[in-house]
C-alpha cells in the first residue's frame, strides 16, 4: 500500500473546525475564520472559473487551488487538480483514482495516493467512509484532522452502516442517535435527541422542529443564544461556518459554537454566487 502521509495510528488526530469563504457575483471573495469573524482582504475570483469548491478551499481554471487558513487568510497555489472527483468535504477531496487531497488548518495541502480511497462511499464535512469489502458489509470511518492527516477512527457501540444522515462534524444513525466529532478526535453519541436534519453546515444544523444546534470544539452539542435578527426559518444558504438569511444577513459560527451576525456595509450578500460546503 502506497501511503505518503497517512500513519497507522490507533487514535484520531484533531478534527477540523470550519474556516471558509464565499464569492459574490462581482468576484469579491469574503473569508471567515474559526473565531467567527468575516473579512474582505481584497481577494477576487471569477465565479464562472471556479470548478471545484469545498469548505476551506476552491479550485479555479488553470490548476489553481485557493485555501483558507484558521485566521481567514487566503492562499493560491498551483496543483495538478483531478478531472474526476469521487467526493469532497470541508477540508478534503478525493479523486476517482484514490488520490486524497487534504488541507490543514494553516491552508497547506497534503496529497496521499492510496487504493483504499477508491472505495470511499459517503462524505461528511471532515470525515468520509470507506468500504472494506465488495459487499460493503464492513465500512470504516476516516477523519481529516487539523494537521491535514486522515486517520481511521476506532468506533464503539455502532457501525457506520447504521448511519443514515451525514453532516459537517456530526452524523445520525438509524436509531436517531446523533454523533459528533470533537477536536481531540473523539466520536461520541450525544444524550440529547434531535429531529431530522434540516439546514446543514460544517459546525451547525437545524432540525425538523426548526431548532438550531451547533457543535463546539469539544464535541458538545449546543443550542446557542441567537442574534436578535435571526429567524431560523429564514436561513437560506449555508456554508461551512456561516449562513445567510433571506434578507441577506451574514451569520458566522465560531469554533465554540457561538453565533454572530456580521455586518459588512460595502457588500450585499444577497448577491452571493459561490457558497462553500
Image (cartoon, rainbow, N blue to C red):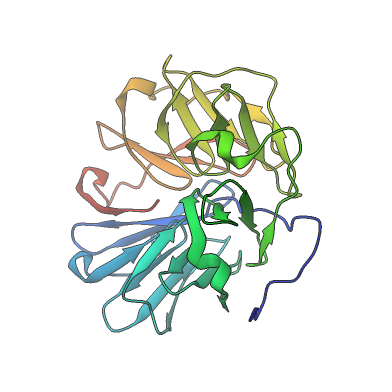
Q: Where is residue 30 in the image (x, y as percent from the top left)?
A: 37, 58
For this orientation, the residue located farthest to the front is: 135
Specify whether 63 is left or right of 150: left
Check the image and report above or below for 97 versus 274: below
Residue in the image at 72% along x and 55% along y = 14
Residue in the image at 30% along x and 74% along y = 60
Q: In which quarter of the image is the N terminus?
A: bottom right
Of the pair 271 and 203, the residue shown nearer to us: 203
Specify whether 139 is left or right of 248: right
Q: Position of residue 65 (x, y in %)?
A: 40, 76
Q: To which quarter of the image does residue 114 belong? A: bottom right
Count of labels in the image = 0
Of the pair 270 and 84, the residue shown nearer to us: 84
Instruction: Using the rendered image of the protein, determine whether residue 107 is visible from the camera's viewpoint.
Output: no
Specify whether 248 is left or right of 191: left
For this orientation, the residue located farthest to the right is: 10
Residue in the image at 49% along x and 67% along y = 118
Of the pair 16 and 98, the residue shown nearer to us: 98
Check the image and report above or below for 175 versus 272: above
For this orientation, the residue located farthest to the top is: 209
Q: To which quarter of the image does residue 103 belong? A: bottom right
Instruction: Using the rendered image of the protein, determine whether residue 28 is visible from the camera's viewpoint.
Output: yes
Residue in the image at 65% along x and 38% along y = 159
Of the pair 147 and 73, the residue shown nearer to us: 147
Q: Position of residue 89 (x, y in %)?
A: 47, 55
Q: Where is residue 2 in the image (x, y as percent from the top left)?
A: 63, 81
Specify whether 267 is left or right of 36: left
Amino acid at each position: 500500500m502506497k501511503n505518503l502521509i497517512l500513519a497507522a495510528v490507533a487514535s484520531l488526530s484533531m478534527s477540523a473546525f470550519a474556516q471558509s469563504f464565499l464569492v459574490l457575483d462581482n468576484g469579491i471573495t469574503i473569508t471567515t475564520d474559526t473565531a467567527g469573524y468575516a473579512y474582505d482582504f481584497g481577494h477576487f475570483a471569477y465565479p464562472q472559473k471556479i470548478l471545484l469548491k469545498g469548505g476551506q478551499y476552491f479550485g479555479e481554471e488553470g490548476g489553481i487551488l485557493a485555501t483558507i487558513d484558521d485566521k481567514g487568510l487566503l492562499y493560491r497555489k498551483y496543483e495538478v487538480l483531478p478531472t474526476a472527483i469521487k467526493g469532497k468535504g470541508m477540508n478534503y477531496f478525493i479523486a476517482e483514482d484514490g488520490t486524497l487531497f487534504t488541507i490543514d488548518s494553516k491552508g497547506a495541502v497534503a496529497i496521499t495516493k492510496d487504493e483504499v480511497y477508491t472505495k470511499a462511499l459517503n462524505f461528511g464535512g471532515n470525515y468520509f467512509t470507506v468500504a472494506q469489502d465488495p459487499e460493503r458489509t464492513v465500512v470504516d470511518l476516516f477523519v481529516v484532522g487539523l494537521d491535514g492527516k486522515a486517520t481511521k477512527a476506532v468506533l464503539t457501540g455502532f457501525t457506520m452502516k447504521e448511519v443514515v444522515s451525514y453532516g459537517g462534524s456530526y452524523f445520525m444513525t438509524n436509531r436517531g442517535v446523533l454523533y459528533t466529532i470533537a477536536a481531540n478526535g473523539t466520536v461520541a453519541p450525544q444524550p440529547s435527541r434531535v429531529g431530522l436534519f434540516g439546514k446543514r453546515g460544517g459546525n451547525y444544523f437545524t432540525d425538523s422542529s426548526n431548532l438550531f444546534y451547533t457543535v463546539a470544539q469539544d464535541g458538545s452539542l449546543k443550542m446557542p443564544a441567537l442574534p436578535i435578527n435571526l429567524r431560523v426559518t429564514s436561513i437560506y444558504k449555508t456554508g461551512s461556518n456561516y449562513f445567510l438569511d433571506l434578507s441577506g444577513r451574514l451569520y458566522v459560527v465560531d469554533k465554540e459554537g457561538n453565533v454572530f451576525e456580521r455586518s459588512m456595509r460595502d457588500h450585499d450578500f444577497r448577491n452571493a454566487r459561490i457558497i462553500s460546503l
